[in-house]
Image (cartoon, helix red, strand yellow):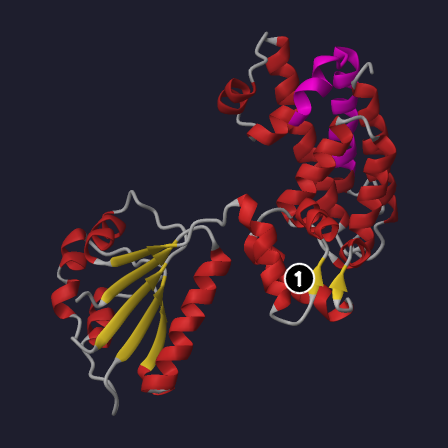
Amino acid sequence: MSTIFLFTGENSYALRQEKHKWMREFSQKHGQENLQRLDGKGLSFHSLLDEVSALPFIAGKRLLIVTGIPAYSKEEMEVLPESVHPDCLLLFIDPKPDKRLSSTKSLLKIATVKEFPPIAPGQLKQWMQQYVQANGKTIQPAAQNRLLEIVGEDQDALSQELDKIQLYAGDSIEVKHVDILAVPSGEQEVWTLTNTIAAGKKNDALQYAQLLLTRGEDAYSLWSILLWMLKNTFLVFVAVQDGIKNPATIASEYGVPFPSVKSLLPFVSSARRAHMENFIRWAVATDIELKTGGYKSTQEAPEELVCLIDQFIIRSSALSAR
């Protein structure tokens, strides 16, 4: 029977829940003193051997959890099974291990591996309903859709937002509760802002930027998002000018995320070259001024930068002839 385990996968929520379940059930049965956690980074092989060879303290088992896969040699990892005490359970946790490393390759062969893949999109709404039902609440379908629009499909981020919203809402979570409290993830902010601007919805984009700032988004972070969007817009524009209009080809050859390519293609296809050049000149000059003190914008007083964000969104509407 294997005593070495590996938890891995991109579903950080499910992975963390399983880890906590292991820790809780093990502590109840064998005592907290027989549960130890170590950081795999910098953990020497000899130190790990000392830990896995130790006997449990007045109990039947001992659980050792190592976060991250240490950079051991192939030979060191292969002798690990015979070095682990029969009453010691060794659990490695690494959501995204580097499978090119010999230590990872060897561990995958000797360990009992449990994968935690992202939950299927079609199951997310069912999970959300079950999640709030555990606290005696329900969530309306429209509120589920709105939360997915704002936060995205990351189960970990959704659970955090649901925990917060449940404290505020009554027995049933409605769209208004989500709109007031839900905070977009970084990726979702980029996606929503890019889509809104690319769709030509200037006023909606201005309102969304203001909403992000009201909810505590840093103005400099929002400015960086806009610059990142402009870079992608320019790359897609160049691809179209070169006669490339296949989204997958543009994403691969120009390094632009595929969802952004799909959103930006219709927008840049009717963009005017002169407007693109003028906008880039303005954005670059403005960014230089921000970094060299040309604008009196600080973290404590970002008013000038907030105005520049509005200008960026307004000027972007001139990129397309629509």
Q: Quadrant of residue 156?
A: bottom right
Q: Does residue 11 appear left or right of residue 283 in this picture?
A: left
**Foreground residue, 11 or 306?**
11
- x and y percentages locating residue 194 in the rendered image: 71, 33
Residue bearing mark 1: 162
Q: What's drawn in magenta, residue-wise?
A: 263-289
Judged from the image, the secondary structure of the residue bearing numbered disc 1 is helix
- x and y percentages locating residue 127 in the rendered image: 57, 57
* Residue at the (64%, 9%) spot, across then down: 241
291 vs 314: above or below: below
Inspect this view and state whether residue 308 appears.
no
**Foreground residue, 3 or 208?**
3
**Foreground residue, 221 or 37?**
37
For the stretch drawn in magenta, the main secondary structure is: helix
Quadrant of image for the C terminus: top right
234 vs 18: above or below: above
